[in-house]
């Protein structure tokens, strides 16, 4: 089993049957730093040019690595939290999870987007947040069975063919994993920062770490880590149980040297309001859960200011 | 019973960690790559990209064609030996990994798919798409499992439906699929997985264990009736 490090990625080459034919050459260098710099420059040369979305000031991606940790719920409540903290800000929501688009459900939005005069899709708006999702373009039960190239093309449309208007922030709900969608987005538009969501479990943190590493590789600043489903409080006896472990995300943030943006508890209200399409930040604005999201939102704004200066 | 697990979640390979496999080397033999066994009796074989990465924290940022190629190798070039069941753990979604697995297994036989959902609407919404995917690709749906279904407070035994309840069962009904059962949200199961311990050995008397047992038995029965 040969492992070759090329351009910062590990390629696997089978030593029998020659099934892999796409590795080109192996660079050897005594000075690994010079090698890394050379690799970075080569990578930058080959990449498509990043073009900002007109009218959108800052793009924040919400990613995780692992599925099922609450990315979409966090993205939705983060977007609403940003607005709740500062009513003068305009925030949009882009659902880049083409395979499992959750934003329509979470934001209680349905229907096909209309086209503007210049043939762009008009986002559907609820709670003052314009939203775009693959979920608006396909049937409820239809699977999106797309290979990489189609996904890239679909993402391109969601980014460029939408009439976003003027936005201070565009929050992008990423799909789980570290693949085509993530690459397509980071190569296509400049991203102000990435928020990584994880539960306290090691399994989720392992993937969150990979997610953070991916962003470092493509030069996207990691704004910080959010620890979701941190603790469950029994509604009857108030006993706290750390169902998914405790504080793992906080520790990972320390280890990776990224900011810990906040804890979101595992609370029935969050799930109930999500299922109803009435995110907790606007349906129960005075609840501790809504406050938790707003805390994360203000930490995100602080980090954005630091990173962009 | 000899069981193999093929972990095709290339971006987030969790199985080696859950089975406490560490990072053993993958060896080759005449018939291909030797899967990693969890015990000396070779009752559970595992292959995952987790064993092939130099750095365990490395991000696998691959586009489709590379993923397809590796999955093709996992299916054709691993010397699984004689197995009663091969379980394939797929990532969320309906993309390259799923298509690659089905295409490569076409020349063999895919007995069916088990779909796992949590009870809440955003999850069942996505799994509904997975069901359509299975129907379109001709994969038999062996059944639906409702995971994280209810949490019993260890202090007062009050059951809270943190992620709602019944969504998986409802989904099975509306799509005409078999409902395999509910697995509760159990911190002991979560902790066992974290530590790579065998939950079935450590907590054989728990409600979670009996839920998982019953699901396994139903599955075996339906596989045997073919």
Image: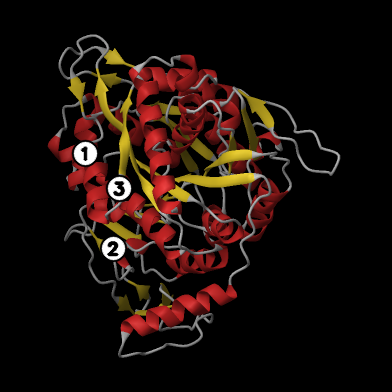
**Which residue in the rendered view is the most extreme toward the front?**
A309
Q: Which of A156 and A92 is in front in this view?
A: A92
Q: Which of marks 3 and 1 is nearer the N terminus?
A: 3
Q: Is residue B161 visible?
A: no
Q: Nearer the viewer, residue A194 or B61?
A: A194
Q: In which quarter of the image is residue B33?
A: bottom left
Mark seen at residue A205? 3
Q: Distance between the residues labelled 1 and 2?
A: 21 Å
Q: Residue at x 47, y 18 (%)?
A: A273
Task: Using the image, determine if residue B153 lies above or below residue A94.
Answer: above
Could you classify mark 1 by the number of other residues whose Cα lies within 10 Å: few (under 14), some (14-19), or many (20 or more)?
some
Mark seen at residue A247? 1
The kind of secondary structure element at disc 3 is: helix
Could you classify mark 2 by the number of other residues whose Cα lies within 10 Å: few (under 14), some (14-19), or many (20 or more)?
some
Measuring from the top left, give residue B25's x and y in whole percent.
25, 72
The kind of secondary structure element at disc 1 is: loop
Tags 1 and 2 touching, CB below 8 Å: no
Q: Mark 3 lies on which chain?
A: A
Number of numbered discs present? 3
Q: Which residue is drawn at 53% across and 73% down?
A: A44
Task: Using the image, determine if residue B90 lies above or below residue B132.
Answer: below
Mark seen at residue B166? none
Q: How far apart are marks 3 and 1 (CA)?
A: 11 Å
Measuring from the top left, give residue A185's x and y in whole percent.
57, 55
**Which residue in the rendered view is the most extreme toward the right?**
A117
Mark seen at residue B56? 2
Q: Distance between the residues labelled 2 and 3?
A: 12 Å
Measuring from the top left, give residue A241's x and y in whole percent.
20, 25
């Amino acid at each position: 089993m040969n492992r070759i490090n090329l351009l910062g990625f590990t390629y696997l080459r089978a030593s029998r049957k020659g099934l892999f034919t796409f590795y080109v050459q192996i660079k050897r260098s005594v000075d690994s730093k010079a090698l890394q710099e050379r690799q970075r420059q080569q990578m930058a040369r080959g990449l498509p040019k990043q073009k900002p979305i007109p009218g959108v000031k800052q793009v924040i991606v919400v990613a995780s690595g692992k599925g099922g940790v609450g990315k979409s719920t966090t993205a939705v409540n983060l977007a609403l939290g940003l607005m709740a903290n500062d009513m003068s800000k305009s925030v949009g929501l882009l659902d880049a999870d083409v395979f499992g688009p959750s934003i329509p459900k979470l934001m209680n939005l349905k229907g096909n987007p209309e086209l503007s005069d210049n043939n762009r899709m008009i986002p559907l708006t609820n709670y003052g947040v314009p939203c775009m999702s693959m979920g608006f373009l396909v049937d409820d039960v239809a699977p999106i069975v797309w290979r990489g190239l189609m996904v890239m093309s679909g993402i391109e449309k969601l980014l460029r063919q939408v009439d976003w208007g003027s936005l201070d922030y565009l929050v992008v709900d990423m799909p789980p994993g570290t693949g085509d969608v993530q690459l397509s987005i980071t190569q296509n538009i400049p991203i102000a920062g990435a928020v990584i969501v994880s539960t306290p479990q090691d399994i989720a943190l392992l993937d969150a770490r990979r997610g953070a590493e991916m962003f470092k590789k493509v030069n996207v600043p990691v704004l910080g880590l959010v620890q979701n489903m941190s603790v469950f409080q029994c509604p009857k006896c108030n006993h706290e149980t750390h169902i998914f472990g405790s504080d793992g995300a906080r520790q990972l943030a320390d280890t990776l040297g990224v900011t810990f943006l906040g804890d979101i508890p595992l609370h029935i209200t969050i799930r109930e309001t999500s299922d109803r399409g009435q995110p907790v930040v606007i349906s129960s604005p005075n609840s501790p859960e809504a406050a938790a999201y707003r805390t994360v939102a203000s930490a995100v704004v602080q980090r954005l200011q630091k990173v962009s200066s | 019973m000899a069981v193999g697990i093929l972990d095709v979640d290339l971006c987030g390979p969790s199985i080696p960690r859950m089975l406490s496999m560490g990072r053993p080397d993958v060896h080759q033999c005449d018939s291909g790559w030797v899967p990693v066994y969890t015990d000396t009796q070779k009752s559970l074989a595992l292959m995952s990209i987790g064993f092939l990465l130099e750095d365990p924290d490395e991000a696998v940022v691959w586009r489709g064609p590379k993923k397809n190629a590796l999955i093709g190798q996992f299916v054709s070039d691993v010397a699984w030996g004689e197995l009663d069941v091969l379980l394939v753990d797929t990532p969320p979604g309906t993309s390259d990994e799923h298509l690659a697995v089905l295409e490569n297994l076409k020349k063999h036989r895919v007995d069916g798919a088990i779909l796992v959902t949590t009870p809440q609407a955003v999850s069942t919404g996505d799994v509904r798409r997975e069901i359509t995917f299975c129907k379109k690709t001709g994969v038999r749906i062996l059944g639906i499992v409702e995971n994280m279904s209810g949490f019993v407070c260890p202090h007062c035994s009050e059951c809270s439906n943190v992620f709602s309840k019944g969504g998986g069962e409802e989904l099975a009904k509306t799509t005409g699929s078999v409902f395999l059962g509910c697995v509760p949200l159990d911190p002991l199961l979560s902790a066992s997985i974290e530590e790579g311990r065998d939950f079935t050995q450590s907590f054989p008397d728990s409600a979670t264990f009996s839920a998982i047992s019953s699901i396994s038995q139903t599955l075996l029965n339906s596989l045997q009736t073919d």
